[in-house]
Amino acid sequence: MALPAAARGIVLFAHGSGSSRFSPRNREMAQQLNEARLATLLVDLLTADEDAVDERTRQLRFDIGLLADRLVDLTDWLGADERTARLNIGYFGASTGAAAALAAAAQRPDTVHAVVSRGGRPDLAKQALARVRAPTLLIVGGNDGAVIDLNRQALELLRSQKRLTIVPGATHLFEESDALGTVSSLARDWFLRHLGNQL
């Protein structure tokens, strides 16, 4: 957890398929948010043993219910911890982590104030989308055709404030020059607008 002085809110990261709290992309994104006085929490949603099983079977990363329950537990922990209890909470989800973030946001509609999905699979949380109240930003690479279609379908099901932003020329992992910087800027602005802890 990174907790800048006079933080404006806190963003809980939900990592995608095969990723972890050590992901260079997620750590770079977290640093950009920290510089904007947004606290961040990066955790692994699977235990070491579960991760080892998932490396072989690729099944737990698609267990959206399990991942969402872990996010809900972390959300409740943030709300009880004196360091973070006053901060509004946002979720940043990538790939399958985005589905978990949306499913968890549906379970904590009064606690989660914003969701950002990067190259996400919100379709995997289809049953929960209509219950999400948090303003939701879906970011997809312009060269990630199948995922663009899945995000457009999910956008239709969301009833909260919502936006789909397509980053031209970017692929699924946003590895192109400046693509991740663009995502960081979009996410930062969305969280600053909706988390609301202006000090």
Image: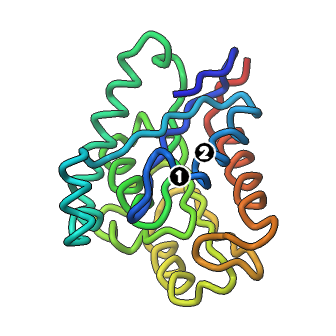
Q: CA distance from mark 1 to mark 2?
A: 6 Å
In this view of the protein, which residue sits in the foreground, 42 or 122? 42
The residue shown at (39%, 74%) is 123
Q: Is residue 196 left or right of residue 11?
A: right
Residue 60, numbered label: none
Q: Is residue 77 left or right of residue 3?
A: left
Q: Residues within 10 Å of mark 1 (few under 14, many from 20)?
A: some
In this rendering, the answer to whether 83 lies above or below 76 is above
Q: Amino acid at mark 2?
A: Arg
> Which residue is identified by label 2?
27
Q: How many numbered marks, from 0 up?
A: 2
**In terms of secondary structure, where does tag 2 sit?**
helix
Instruction: Kindly give the residue lying farthest to the top in the view shown.
Output: 82
Q: Is residue 92 left or right of residue 184?
A: left
In this view of the protein, which residue sits in the foreground, 49 or 147? 49
The residue shown at (26%, 55%) is 51
In this rendering, the answer to whether 193 lies above or below 93 is above
The residue shown at (49%, 19%) is 84
Q: Quadrant of residue 102 in the image?
A: bottom left
The residue shown at (81%, 65%) is 178
Instruction: Estimate the x, y position of residue 71 in percent, counting from the top left.
Output: 33, 43
Circles 1 and 2, Cβ within 8 Å, touching? The answer is: yes
In this view of the protein, which residue sits in the foreground, 72 or 129? 72
Residue 23, numbered label: 1
In this rendering, the answer to whether 168 lies above or below 48 is below
Q: Quadrant of residue 99 in the image?
A: bottom left
Q: Amino acid at mark 1?
A: Ser
Instruction: Estimate the x, y position of residue 59 in percent, counting from the top left.
Output: 21, 69
- Quarter of the image where the C terminus is located: top right
